[in-house]
Amino acid sequence: MQITELSLANQRVLLRVDFNVPMDEDGFITDDSRIQAALPTITYLIEQQAKIILVSHLGRPKKDKMGKFDKLKFSLGAVAAHLSELVASSVLFADDCLGAEVEEIISELQAGEILLLENVRFYPEEEAGDKVFAEKLAQLADIYINDAFGAAHREHASTCTVADFFDNQHKAFGFLMKKEVESGKKLLQQPKNQFVAIIGGAKVSDKILLLRSLLEKVETIVIGGAMAFTFIKAQGGNVGKSLVEDDKIELALSLLSEAKSLGVRILLPVDALAADSFDNDSPFELCDSANINNERMGLDIGQQSQDLFAAAIEDAKTIFWNGPMGVFEFENFAQGTAAIAEAVVRATQNGAFSLVGGGDSVAALQQMGKADEVSFISTGGGAMLELIENGNLVGVAAIGN
């Protein structure tokens, strides 16, 4: 059922959001993108005069030696205050997510009001997907809406199990979740012809399932970042002190062989900026990516690689991008990622469908002021990867059941 088909007036709505936002040491939010992404659903619920009960996690809280959580680091109190500013209305905050006090606040909640519950991960039952815990959460509300795409690949109590306690007439996706799922599935339904995937990051081991899945779907895979050096070394290249997963050399060769048999083109960097150390200010040189000095490490792709990759991207009709081409957080080694961002934008302008998911890929577009110039930016890197790998997510399936 669609959220727009639900009768929401005066109904208690348990809305699972992803407010897992980064905070500094003083507990101030440094990036509110995930909160902003949930606003369309929250605003709609306000307009429909629902009684809104927000539930989210924040980080991976662990108890200290005294058996207490670090509330400065893991409490959602600061999020409630920030959300109040965004919706221009008071947002109530509960110090817990279950119990008599929470139930009392909900009983007094008026139509159109918002209550944010405390970090659901303060209960270990959340990550365990505990049914008893999930049922207690369900009893707080009449309707369940999941808008937390970033956590939809987690079989946790508030993202998955809780949906079992609502029938199909009383649960739905929020607007963000719906858009994320539709965009991911649109990517999967695109024809293989002129479909380019751009995969970066540090480790092949983090992207094995993704790469294997993409071999069945794409025409070209562009591989950058440190993970490219495992493939280059597997082919006999000398990569100096570049990050390499030696235990994945055989896997890299297997993936290259599998790609060849399927007619999938894999593009690897042909040149690199190799530095003396992992430092923005380290001396560096431009060199052949397969012939790096033994005392240096590759930290970014060079101009030839940028041109090679851009040519493939700009010819694409479908693009999926996950992961940087170099050490994007270092200004001197961010140019490769920026060049790829420019190429993706140009392809989109030429009519390609482009989906970007993954922290540094998104950060590159935001830093360049071009986040609005691609087809879709996913709020959930891990969830989007799993959706592409498997075609579905447990949190998505739970709403459909």
Image (cartoon, helix red, strand yellow):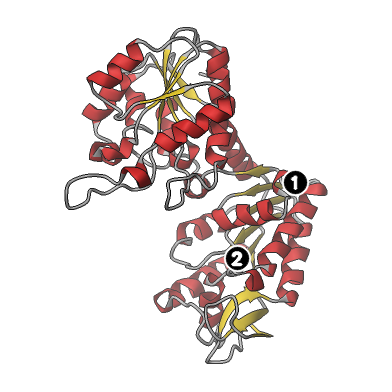
Horizontally, is 219 left or right of 72 in the view?
right
Give the amino acid at mark 2. Answer: Phe
Q: Which numbered disc, 2 or 1, marks the residue that appears first in the sequence?
A: 2
- Give the class, few, some or many, for how many residues have Cα within 10 Å of label 1's Cα (few <14, many ≥20): some
Question: Residue 61 appears at what percent x and percent y?
Answer: 31, 47
Instruction: Tell me the residue at 31%/30% (across/down).
Output: 95
Instruction: Tell me the residue at 51%/45% (across/down).
Output: 380
Question: Residue 377 appears at what percent x and percent y?
Answer: 63, 44
- Quote the CA–CA distance across marks 2 and 1: 20 Å
The relative height of residue 231 versus residue 89 in the rendered view (above or below) is below
Closest to the camera, between mark 2 and mark 1, is: 2
Instruction: Tell me the residue at 53%/21% (across/down).
Output: 89
Question: Residue 386 appears at what percent x and percent y?
Answer: 47, 48
Q: Is residue 135 visible?
A: no
Instruction: Tell me the residue at 55%/53% (across/down).
Output: 358
Give the amino acid at mark 1. Answer: Glu
Residue 205 vs residue 263, the one in the foreground: 205
Residue 91 vs residue 338, the one in the foreground: 91
- Give the class, few, some or many, for how many residues have Cα within 10 Å of label 2's Cα (few <14, many ≥20): many
Residue 96 vs residue 302, the one in the foreground: 96
| Residue at the spot of label 1 | 373
Of the numbered discs in the image, which one, if any, rests on residue 328? 2
The relative height of residue 137 versus residue 177 in the rendered view (above or below) is above
Determine contact: label 2, label 1, CB under 8 Å.
Answer: no
| Numbered marks: total | 2
